[in-house]
Image (cartoon, rainbow, N blue to C red):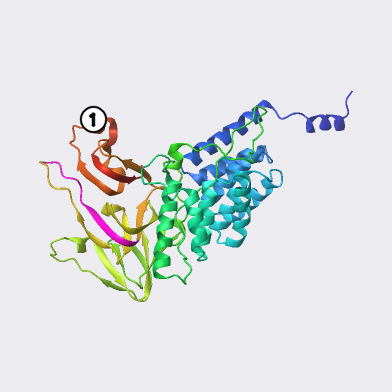
Amino acid sequence: MTSSRGSETTRAFRPAPFFDHGLFLLHLNRGKEEMGRGYHETARREFEEARRLRPRDPEVLLNLSITLFHLGQFDEAETMTRDLLTEHAESVPLLFNLGLILFKSGRDREAREPLEKVLGFAPAHRKAHLTLGLLAQRRGAWDEAQRHFRMAGAELKDGSEGDDSVARTARAAAAEVRIATATRPTLHDTRPTPVVKPEPLDSLTASGKLKFSSGARPRPSAAVLAGMDAAAPVVARPLGPFSPKPGGFLSVACGAGVRVRRGIVVGRTGAPVLEGSPSQASDGLDRILIGASGDGVLLLADPGRVPWLKSLAGESLSVHPERLLAFESALSCRADVTPDAGDRTAPPFLKLAGSGAVALAVSSEPARFEVERGQPLAISARAVVAYGGEVVPELLEASDPLSGLGAGASMRFSGAGFVLADAR
């Protein structure tokens, strides 16, 4: 007869039942799906459930750390990533993610060490070069910044083979460095650029264990490089007078002059001077925009959307009015309306031109679709955030096949340039 203590010992060391393993996979896969859709809080809950069943599973921990990064919980993401590095010290993805977390936390000196280790294992790692370039830019090391931006692909031509979101970010940052060295060479650039994303998971080995590589990683898919994954943007760092805040708010310093879309001002501090009462002006822009200047800060919010910042360097960008939050007054603005073509008239956009910062309202980081001559792009009008280059927009007729497939009113862009769009 078996003693009760012996029975308890047997139960304590009994292998985990198949049901537990199935439940673990259910939560893990649900978390991946939710993270892919950009629902990071839901993803976190699923990964926490998977972690409860497998506390040391590296795939769960790495997915969870990336989710925490997107939620802006950098301290927890750092702790988890460092813990994984104790067992996988030469993992390029983990080292890069640690450097990116520290960079986003504003700990520039600490961020350089893991990023430089990445280049020791993978000298051509473009995202590490890009992030190190942004760090050099912030401390005013212009030559070093430009060297890293070149390695990240800044010299690739727009739309050329190999051009992607990393190269475009590097080009924009390199342009800012050129402007900075020409106009304020003794000042540090405190306007970090664009979103750099964590490294994804490596593949699983046949044994089911997570494989960490110390060499160069396979090239990510074109969709990921183009920024077309569904991940929602993290809270961006300030750019010019604009400082995104959690919850979808945007803080706007009015000192140098900004123009703001009507209907989205939800708060203020100080005493900013507001100008632009609606009038019968021929261009009608004062019915859409107000000017703000002086000693004060405005707080903006567009319900259901978050701020996304873009820097223009002597170029133009046509923005749908409902997707515009604000822009620096140094930029010129005019209505950009396609001439009538019977009953087909493209909706009015606002064309911004010059050098300065623009704040757009998006649901997630917008995808960038390249438009080539002879290869027009047709896309749902509600998805269009902005467009640039030498593209011509046209509103398609209701009978267009896209309408019948659920796209609703659609637009066609011909010529050469790009379209920024998000799906919600």
Q: Residues within 10 Å of mark 1 (few under 14, many from 20)?
A: few
**Is residue 248 placed above or below 211 in the rendered structure?**
below
**Is residue 185 placed above or below 411 in the rendered structure?**
below
Magenta region: which residues? 343-356
Q: Which residue is painted at 51% across and 38% down in the image?
A: 219
Residue 34 in percent (x, y) is at 49, 39
Q: Is residue 212 found inside the magenta-colored segment of the image?
A: no
Residue 7 in percent (x, y) is at 83, 29
The quarter of the image holding the C terminus is top left
The quarter of the image holding the N terminus is top right
Q: Can residue 30 be seen in this view?
A: yes
Q: What's the residue type where badge 1 is placed?
A: Pro
Q: Would you say 323 lies left or right of 64 here?
A: left
Q: Name the residue under label 1.
A: 401
Circle 1 — which element? helix
Identify which residue, 392 or 265, lies in the foreground: 392
